[in-house]
């Protein structure tokens, strides 16, 4: 069973909208998208990368704003800060990837390293943060958190913003403005080119 399959199987055992289940499902989707960008049909890689970029952006923003404060209390401040720092570094790499041509040699090399880093980060969360959340928070509290994560993701930035990444305080203050700009750019990108390339990249 692949990591993505294991994550989905574990998520299915949890109540609907449980924050751990929500995040596990997203981890599995992130793995799927990495595989699609890395080795999927060439004509679909650009679109899959845009999906990956957006999912990583909203996923990490929601984790920093909603999950990480709870993780500080349940898994410990050191663990939470380590995950925030990883997400800050990941955001920088994602921003660099976003400037490169999908499929170029530099993009391919950087994507491989980035995929490994994101996988390691997810495993740290699943082995350290998630068990603490499950054992120290009630099912009701985890469901409330899951709903908040999904709500935040609907309005979170869809592109990397390294200056705010890793800082929940900055995510709360800068995020809403960045999100408006990102979603406007996404709307233009989705209608601006018949070749599938996005303007401004």
Image: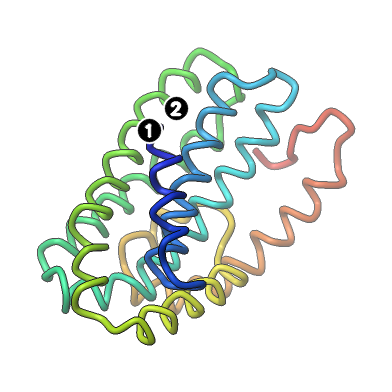
State the separation of the CA atoms marked 2 and 1. Answer: 5 Å
Residue 95, above or below 116: below
Q: Nearer the viewer, residue 47 or 40?
A: 40
Horizontal side of 9 relative to 77 (left or right) equals: right
Q: Nearer the viewer, residue 191 or 112?
A: 112
Secondary structure under the numbered disc 1 in the rendered image: helix
Q: Position of residue 55 (x, y in %)?
A: 55, 52
Q: Position of residue 69 (x, y in %)?
A: 26, 77
Q: Nearer the viewer, residue 201 or 91?
A: 91
According to the picture, the residue beneath numbered tag 1 turns out to be: 114
Q: Position of residue 65 (x, y in %)?
A: 38, 74
The residue sitting at 47% across, 58% down in the picture is 12
Secondary structure under the numbered disc 2 in the rendered image: helix
Q: Which image quarter: residue 115?
A: top left
Image quadrant in which the N terminus is located: top left
Q: Position of residue 169 (x, y in %)?
A: 34, 77
The residue sitting at 49% across, 53% down in the picture is 26
The residue sitting at 39% across, 43% down in the picture is 6
- Tell me the number on the disc at residue 162: none
Q: Residues within 10 Å of mark 2 (few under 14, many from 20)?
A: many
Residue 183, above or below 7: below
Q: Residues within 10 Å of mark 1 (few under 14, many from 20)?
A: some
- Tell me the number on the disc at residue 111: 2
Residue farthest front in this picture:
13
Image quadrant in which the C terminus is located: top right
- Dots 2 and 1: beta carbons under 8 Å? yes
């Amino acid at each position: 069973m692949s990591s993505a399959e294991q994550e989905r199987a574990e998520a299915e055992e949890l109540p609907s909208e449980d924050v751990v289940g929500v995040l596990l499902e997203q981890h599995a989707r992130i793995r799927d998208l990495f595989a699609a960008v890395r080795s999927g049909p060439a004509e679909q890689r650009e679109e899959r990368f845009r999906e990956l970029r957006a999912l990583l952006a909203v996923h990490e923003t929601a984790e920093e704003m909603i999950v990480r404060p709870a993780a500080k209390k349940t898994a410990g401040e050191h663990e939470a800060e380590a995950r925030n720092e990883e997400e800050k570094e990941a955001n920088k790499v994602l921003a660099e990837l976003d400037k490169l041509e999908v499929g170029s040699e530099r993009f391919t090399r950087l994507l491989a390293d980035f995929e490994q880093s994101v996988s390691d980060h997810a495993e740290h969360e699943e082995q350290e943060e998630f068990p603490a959340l499950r054992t120290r928070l009630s099912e009701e509290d985890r469901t409330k958190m899951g709903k908040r994560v999904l709500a935040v993701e609907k309005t979170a930035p869809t592109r990397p913003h390294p200056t705010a990444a890793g800082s929940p305080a900055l995510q709360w203050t800068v995020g809403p403005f960045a999100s408006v700009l990102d979603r406007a750019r996404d709307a233009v990108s989705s209608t601006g080119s018949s070749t599938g390339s996005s303007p401004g990249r």
